[in-house]
Image (cartoon, grey):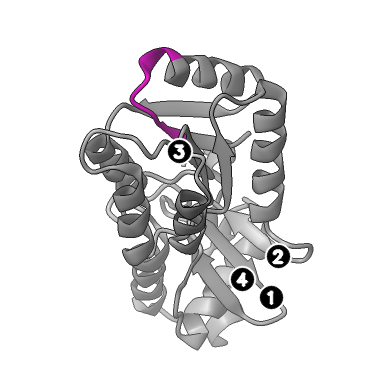
Amino acid sequence: MARILIVEDNRNLAHGLRTNLEFEGHTAEVAEDGAAGLALARGRAHDLILLDLMLPEPDGFRVLETIRAEGVETPVLVLTARGDEADKVRGLQNGADDYVTKPFALRELLARVAALLRRSKPAPGQLAFGEVVVDPATHGVTRAGAPVTLRPKEYELLRALLRRAGRVATRGELLREVWGYQDCVVSRTLDTHVGELRRKLEEDPANPRHILTVRKTGYRLVAEQDQGPS
């Protein structure tokens, strides 16, 4: 299931797209002008953006230019009546991943959506939760496609949590595994590093959705769909 943002001022078309995408098993939300599209693209995690170009201000070109300039790497499929070659070139040069002109065949559009979503999935061997992708082969970490710099102990702590696949890691286990401390050691080092991971990787560090505290025990890292009481 993917999270898709539709930025389209034709209400009937936008809601028809949402219905068909939801039928395919995705979740979708609609923004009916450029300003609303910008706000949602900046503020929420999406797996794909369907973007019209002929929008109330700012237009789709400006929306695309702005989110790419701000580091939003979510794949964008431009969906527009502007079929001139110059418009296609401009859209692709400004960061669009695909370009579909109206009118379009629904089956073709859904196939292009599926292809973009496949391309944006983590490669084999990579680990992912929310917007975060971890590549153990390179020690690389990205969030929403943008590189994240982790200190060595932060990365080791993240891997320790990921290895447990949602199971609870006790404070003692993490202190031994990451820092080599004994059970008897009382240290705020772990909490400080967890705080830094949340700051760098969570959308709202004060209300984390993935790196969760288990009271009187330790921490667990969960994918969004796995969350439960902690």
Answer yes or no: do the residues labelled 2 and 1 have beta carbons within 8 Å?
A: yes
Q: Earlier in the sequence, mark 1 or mark 3?
A: 3
Q: Earlier in the sequence, mark 2 or mark 3?
A: 3
Answer yes or no: do the residues labelled 4 and 2 have beta carbons within 8 Å?
A: no
Comparing marks 4 and 2, which lies closer to the viewer?
Answer: 2
Q: Amino acid at mark 1?
A: Pro
Instruction: Report which residue position mark 1 lands on.
Output: 136
Instruction: Report which residue position mark 2 lands on.
Output: 126
Task: Calculate the distance from the C-alpha at mark 3 to the C-alpha at mark 4.
Answer: 46 Å
Answer yes or no: do the residues labelled 1 and 4 have beta carbons within 8 Å?
A: yes
Q: Earlier in the sequence, mark 4 or mark 2?
A: 2
In the figure, is residue 111 to the left or right of 224? right
Task: Calculate the distance from the C-alpha at mark 2 to the C-alpha at mark 1.
Answer: 7 Å
Is residue 228 in view from this perspective?
Answer: no
Q: Is residue 6 magenta?
A: yes
Q: Is residue 181 magenta?
A: no
Which one is in front, 105 or 198? 105
Which one is in front, 148 or 186? 148
Answer yes or no: do the residues labelled 2 and 3 have beta carbons within 8 Å?
A: no
Comparing marks 1 and 3, which lies closer to the viewer?
Answer: 3
Q: Amino acid at mark 3?
A: Arg
Residue range in magenta is: 5-12
Q: Earlier in the sequence, mark 1 or mark 4?
A: 1
Q: Position of residue 139 (x, y in %)?
A: 62, 80
Comparing marks 3 and 4, which lies closer to the viewer?
Answer: 3
Instruction: Report which residue position mark 4 lands on.
Output: 159
Task: Calculate the distance from the C-alpha at mark 1 to the C-alpha at mark 3.
Answer: 42 Å
Q: Earlier in the sequence, mark 3 or mark 4?
A: 3
Instruction: Report which residue position mark 3 lands on.
Output: 82
In the figure, is residue 60 to the left or right of 154? left
Secondary element under disc 1, as helix, strand or loop, is loop
